[in-house]
Image (spheres, rainbow, N blue to C red):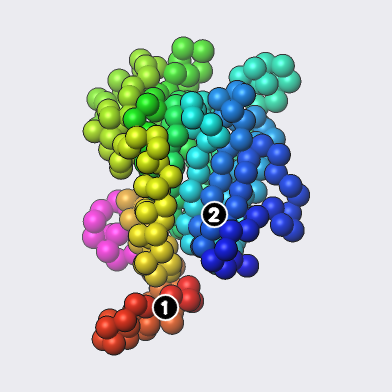
Amino acid sequence: MVENETMSVSAGFPAFEFIRAHVRGHALHLTIDRPDVRNALHPPAHRELARAFDILEADDALHCAVITGAGEKAFCTGSDLKYRAATGDAFVPESGFAGLAERFGLTKPVIAAVNGDAVGGGLEIVLACDLAVAVKTARFGLPEPRVGLAASGGLHRLARQIPMKHAMDIALSGRLFPAEEARALGLVNQVVPAEALAETVEALVETLSRCAPLALRATKQMMLDGLDKPTLAAAFASEFPAYRAMLDSEDAREGPLAFSQKRQPRWRGQ
């Protein structure tokens, strides 16, 4: 399905209305396209993102994904509360907010390109991604308590990713905090000027593309699933399907061969 040229993921599927999706190389690029509501998500947008991540998960030619928001002001500002109030529809897919937050079996890396504010569910998306790059002007936060709600899944991820006192401060205060604080807390990997975001993310995708795709999947599965084991010894003793698939792959033989022949490996993802 995927070659080096850019192609539309919607080919062969219903056209997306609230997101944009295209493939470049082996990376799926997703853009939340609701800038008029600061890229807040309503049920139709959730369904489209869930479908896009289904495509990512199912297609072996796709090795990673990038998610960002349209415009320069917002990455995603969470749920579209005006839509919810007007319709009473609060649907979220089984795979969680944005079709990602509860997709626990996804072994392909996902990068958040945080082009603006990531608040509420927007921060939950960032927390669900494996890597994140943010522009200097981006703000982060879980303001749900200020509108009578709790951040739900975002709370569980936040408490597992940063020290508890910092997590409680963010969750209980509902305050917004700047990108540099997010970087200091470990919520994002890099903070860059807005004009450097696309180039920085593309360089990150290129770095991933130099690695064997099955090795990336095994690495992600072992790190995340290993944390669910009760002890370090139990993690070492566990079986991880992606790791076994990697060991049995042609790529596992190609890597050492390419190294011995002093050439770049030709990954096939199988």
Q: Position of residue 38 (x, y in %)?
A: 55, 25
Residue position marked by numbered label 2 in the rendering: 28
Q: Is residue 25 rendered magenta in the image? A: no
Number of other residues with Cα within 10 Å of mark 1, as a class: few under 14, some 14 to 19, many 20 or more: few
Residue 36 position in % (x across, y down): 62, 24
Name the amino acid, label 1.
Arg
Q: Is residue 213 above or below residue 161?
A: below
Quarter of the picture holding the N terminus? bottom right
Looking at the image, which residue is at 65% across and 48% down?
Answer: 51
Asked whether residue 235 is drawn in magenta, I would say: yes
Q: Secondary structure at mark 2?
A: strand
Q: Quadrant of residue 139?
A: top left
**First to last magenta residue range:** 229-238
Residue 207 percent coordinates (x, y):
35, 60
Residue that label 1 marks: 266
Label 1 sits on a secondary structure element that is loop
Disc assigned to residue 173: none
Q: Is residue 239 left or right of 74 when viewed as pictured?
A: left
Q: Is residue 44 left or right of residue 255?
A: right
Residue 264 lies in quadrant? bottom left
